[in-house]
Image (cartoon, grey):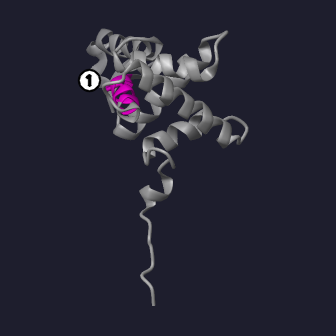
Amino acid sequence: MGKKFTASRDQLRADPRHGSVLASKFINCLMHDGKKSIAQRVFYDAMEIVEQRVPETPPIEVFKQAVDNVKPSIEVRSKRVGGATYQVPTPVNPKRQQTLAIRWILAAVRGRAGRSISLSLADEIVGAFKREGTAMTTRENIHRMAEANKAFAHFAW
């Protein structure tokens, strides 16, 4: 009998071109109306543009670093205490950090009008890699809000 191939769960979920689970999750979030092949084409076209703009680093590494740069470490949550609502800064768990980063990058891409999605996505990824761009601005605003409401940290649950 031949040896049976058993793939790990991550191998099954990794995207076909880069072997990255993060890229696969991103493609699934980018997907609209179940059209995954279109979402993959948009993502891979953006990766080719990223490769041209940042030639010294592999594009998938640029993408991973961009997502890491956008991840928030702290956020504010509303907490009602005796009739008043406070914005309480709380740490963000790693899975939510990744989800928020992907969501903010895609929101920034969809907010740009008049250009192809691939080009906008490449711009945002390169911008996040260099710690600039709309998604990074969103992260900085969240951190600034948490810093401003530090006095209410004792209400954290």
Q: Position of residue 78 (x, y in %)?
A: 44, 22
Q: How many marks?
A: 1
Image quarter in which the C terminus is found: top left
- Relative to residue 16, is residue 63 depicted above or below? above
**Range drawn in magenta:** 62-75
User: Which picture quadrant has residue 120?
Assistant: top right
Inspect this view and state whether residue 88 appears.
Answer: yes
- Residue that label 1 marks: 154
Looking at the image, residue 71 sits to the left or right of residue 13; the answer is left
Does 113 lie within the magenta span? Answer: no
Does 72 lie within the magenta span? Answer: yes
Q: Position of residue 117 (x, y in %)?
A: 62, 21
**Main SS category, magenta section:** helix
Q: Position of residue 30 (x, y in %)?
A: 59, 33
Amino acid type, callout 1 = His
Inspect this view and state whether residue 78 appears.
Answer: no
Image quarter in which the N terminus is found: bottom left
Along the viewing direction, whichever of 148 and 96 lies nearer the viewer:
96
Q: Position of residue 100 (x, y in %)?
A: 46, 29
Looking at the image, residue 68 sits to the left or right of residue 26; the answer is left
The local secondary structure at tag 1 comes to: helix
Q: Residue at x 44, y 71 (%)?
A: 6
Q: Residue at x 49, y 28 (%)?
A: 48
